[in-house]
Amino acid sequence: MESADDPAAFTILVDADACPVKEEVYRVAKRFDARVRVVSNSPFRIPDSPLVKRVLVSDSFDAADDWIAERAGPRTLVVTGDILLADRCLKAGAKVLGHNGRAFDSASIGSAIATRAIMEDLRAGAGSDLGGSGGGGPPPFSKADRSRFLQSLDTMLVQLQRGA
């Protein structure tokens, strides 16, 4: 097993402010002896582990995204619900996993970005045309999402461990 200081070890970078699966990441990362960096604009509790470190960034726009994207690479797995951050990390060679267990890759990111843009336009139109707030957003996080996330996280960590 690799240690927290081993440069060959892989790292999980968590876009943590709105992440509903932090506890799952900690649990699975421990099994794989993977480093975890929990990146956020606000402090919260993390497990007492030499493998898990909190990274507190400024509250400026995209500070957490920028920190993560600058450190993403072939030995990292990024956990995020932010499609634009996912795209930046994929371009850096990282593996990327959404909170719902959806793995992003070079084949799927383009359609995810396009869908995001369409939904943003629809929300903006609904808000201005109907006098509403635009509403919408992702569906509520479910047990199936959590289960799919755990399965995908395990699969991706096995791939990183094997150097795939």
Image (tube, rainbow, N blue to C red):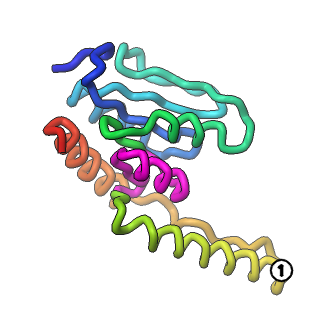
Q: Residue at x 40, y 22 (%)?
A: 52
Give the quadrant of residue 75.
top left
Q: Amino acid at mark 1?
A: Ser
Q: Residue at x 21, y 29 (%)?
A: 31
Is residue 36 toward the left or the right of residue 157 in the image? right
Q: Which residues are magenta?
A: 79-101
* Helix, strand or loop status at disc 1: helix
- Give the quarter of the figure containing the C terminus: top left
Tell how many labels: 1
Say whether residue 102 is visible: no
Spot occupied by residue 40 in the image (x, y as percentages of width and height): 59, 34
Pick the residue in front: 80 or 91: 91
- Which residue is disc 1 drawn over? 128
Is residue 135 toward the left or the right of residue 8 in the image? right
- Give the quarter of the figure containing the N terminus: top left
Q: Residues within 10 Å of mark 1 (few under 14, many from 20)?
A: few
Spot occupied by residue 20 in the image (x, y as percentages of width and height): 48, 46
